[in-house]
Amino acid sequence: MSQKPLILISNDDGITAPGLRVLVEEMSAIGEVIVVAPDKPQSAMGHAITVTVPLRLTPNKIFGDIKAFECSGTPADCVKLALDKVCDRRPDIMVSGINHGPNYSINVIYSGTMSAAVEAAVDGVQAIGFSLCDYSNDADFSHCRKYVRQIASKILEHPLPYGTLLNVNMPKSDTIKGVRVCRQASAKYAENFDERQDPSGRTYYWMTGKFINLEADDNDTDLWAIDNGYVSVVPTKFDLTSNGVIQHLKQLMHE
Amino acid sequence: MSQKPLILISNDDGITAPGLRVLVEEMSAIGEVIVVAPDKPQSAMGHAITVTVPLRLTPNKIFGDIKAFECSGTPADCVKLALDKVCDRRPDIMVSGINHGPNYSINVIYSGTMSAAVEAAVDGVQAIGFSLCDYSNDADFSHCRKYVRQIASKILEHPLPYGTLLNVNMPKSDTIKGVRVCRQASAKYAENFDERQDPSGRTYYWMTGKFINLEADDNDTDLWAIDNGYVSVVPTKFDLTSNGVIQHLKQLMHE
């Protein structure tokens, strides 16, 4: 490449999140970086976009000389705005994260981190969502650096086909055994809303739930990889068609 | 069935939306209905869930004797709360909509209507999202009634395998040619944010964009079905693994 690759970065924890800074530092070593990140935390926003209010984009000097903006919208909004209004050429890759908390298995559908990456991928930009399986705000990301740089470099060199992006999760423990390419584990949350009374006697509910791995015996899933000390890499798509059911449904609908 | 089937209904346009009423009326003819719907419009919320504030659930008499609640959360929140706190037995099916506006093709990833249905499906409940390809609030749903009832009845009789739900879109025109089982068309939005100045001279952006069908020549997609006067039925899944890329990625990551 004659020109340094252009790397667009966003996240869902907001522009001040430590995980974003790690991405900015690592990506600056391999390319020219542009950051467009939410001005406040946007966890569990799924693939929300903002259609009823206008969006703001404000330059931010948090990363020194690196071009960075905070955006009033969701992670998906950040990427849409970045591609249309901030980047003066197409990014070679978009990376999202590093999220504070796992986005493996069914968490992928709730994830703002992944929605930013999906948004880039739909537009035809190579994209990776990175997450650390540690919810704490003072989480240590140092053992992630090597893998972030390695995986992003591989995708820059060998782009994925249109329609696929990567969902990368990294274990909390710093003794990582390696990288496992795997599939999304089937899992769900067993909801158990916590019911309380407010001071005026009205009921309200806090969402709580237990995460249930429906495939605990399988060793080819992202959950297995994380539980066993590996970085999980799941090729992820946004064509949600359940192709295996089409023939069955055709018969059923035309009976 | 000795007992009438239990049918859970939600949407993303809010409890007062005309499309929801059509679902309630049609489903009441084939089962016992429970409604838990957002207390305000929640379009384009994707699969957002509410984790930082508590949720409220308020009984609403809008549908007369039918058990109905408005919820302060997102469509996905509504379904989670309904399954945990409102339904005293497992619903036999969950239907979402009828959305004012299409959820075909890539719209599925932004859709609050579909996120409610996905939420039910993840929990193992049969689920269908219904949308009318007409954005107007006074849209005429009368030609949809027959298809809503027919498709829901078929799924009640012949449940889908775990991991699959239906994304059903209906044309605006009332001269429907029939039902097509099809796949999600590949499409994207070409963003073109409208840049304006507020009265104090600060820039803001309105999201606008042009929808681009990347597979205009193919006749097995949901976009083709709608454009040609058919109801589109896409079997949809929430396992986002791009299985076809796993072998390639394994080689790449271990090079």
Image (cartoon, coloured by chain):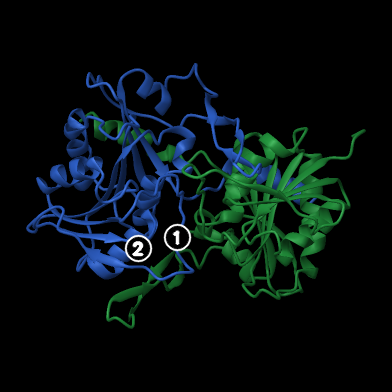
Chain colours: A blue, B green
Q: Where is residue A123 in the image (x, y as percent from the top left)?
A: 36, 60
| Location of mark 1 (residue) | A49
Mark 1: which amino acid? Ile
| Location of mark 2 (residue) | A80
At x 52%, y 30%, the residue is A186
Is residue A245 something that shows in the picture?
no
Label 2 crowd (10 A; few <14 / some 14-19 / many >=20): many
Q: Do labels 1 and 2 share a chain?
A: yes
Q: Is residue A43 left or right of residue A38?
A: right
**SS at mark 1?**
loop
Q: In which quarter of the image is the N terminus of chain A?
A: bottom left
Q: Position of residue B215 (x, y in %)?
A: 48, 64
Is residue B83 something that shows in the picture?
yes
Q: Mark 1 lies on which chain?
A: A
Q: In this view, does B154 lie above or below B42?
A: above
Q: Position of residue A33 (x, y in %)?
A: 16, 54
Q: Mark 2 lies on which chain?
A: A
The Cα atoms of the two marked residues, 1 and 2, are separated by: 9 Å
Q: Depth check: B71 or A71 in front?
A: B71
